[in-house]
Image (cartoon, rainbow, N blue to C red):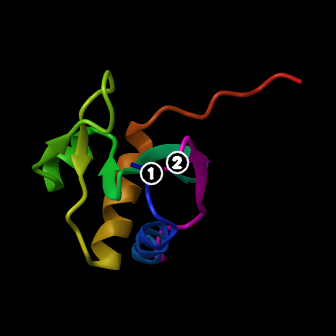
Amino acid sequence: MASSAEYLEYVLDLLGNVPEVTHRKMMGEYLLYASGRLFGGIYDDRFLAKDTPASRAVLSSTDVPYDGAAAMRVVDIEDRAAMATLVARMLPELPQPKRRGR
């Protein structure tokens, strides 16, 4: 089941205090980036964040976005300020984006 555009809009609104948020549609789901770093995604209308020490400290539940994928943290925060703080703490723990050659 693909994620809905309405749920994407809800999540983007929740991420309104996070600078430089972008998304990319991938096979009916959405990958979420902040400052160019992949920090989570929307899978079957579920907002999931990458498993990092910062996300583990705040988010207790895990779920697997699709068969064969690593477990991710279920985002159950509905406060824009708390979400911005979480993403800000996660960013240094995430890898730099890979440079693409031409």
Looking at the picture, which amino acid does disc 2 mark? Gly
In the picture as drawn, the residue positioned furthest to the left comes out as 60
- Check the image and report above or below for 96 versus 61: above
2 or 1: tag closer to the N-terminus: 1
Percent from the top left, x then y, of residue 4? Answer: 46, 64
Q: Nearer the viewer, residue 36 or 74?
A: 74
* Spatial CA span between label 2 and label 1: 5 Å
Q: Nearer the viewer, residue 66 or 14?
A: 66
Inspect the magenta stretch and tell me whether residue 27 lies in it: yes
Mark 1, residues whose alpha carbon is within 10 Å: few (<14), some, or many (≥20)? few
Percent from the top left, x then y, of residue 77? Answer: 23, 68
Looking at the picture, which amino acid does disc 1 mark? Ala
**Residue 85 vs residue 53: left or right?**
right
Residue in the image at 31% along x and 39% along y: 65
Q: Are marks 2 and 1 in contact (CB under 8 Å)?
A: yes
Say which quadrant the C terminus sits in.
top right
Percent from the top left, x then y, of residue 15? Answer: 44, 70
Residue in the image at 55% along x and 41% along y: 27
Percent from the top left, x then y, of residue 33? Answer: 54, 51
- Check the image and report above or below for 81 versus 100: below
Q: Secondary structure at mark 2?
A: loop
Residue indicated by mark 1? 2
Q: Secondary structure at mark 1?
A: loop
**Residue 36 vs residue 62: left or right?**
right
| Stretch in magenta | 16-30
Residue in the image at 16% along x and 53% along y: 59
Residue indicated by mark 2? 28
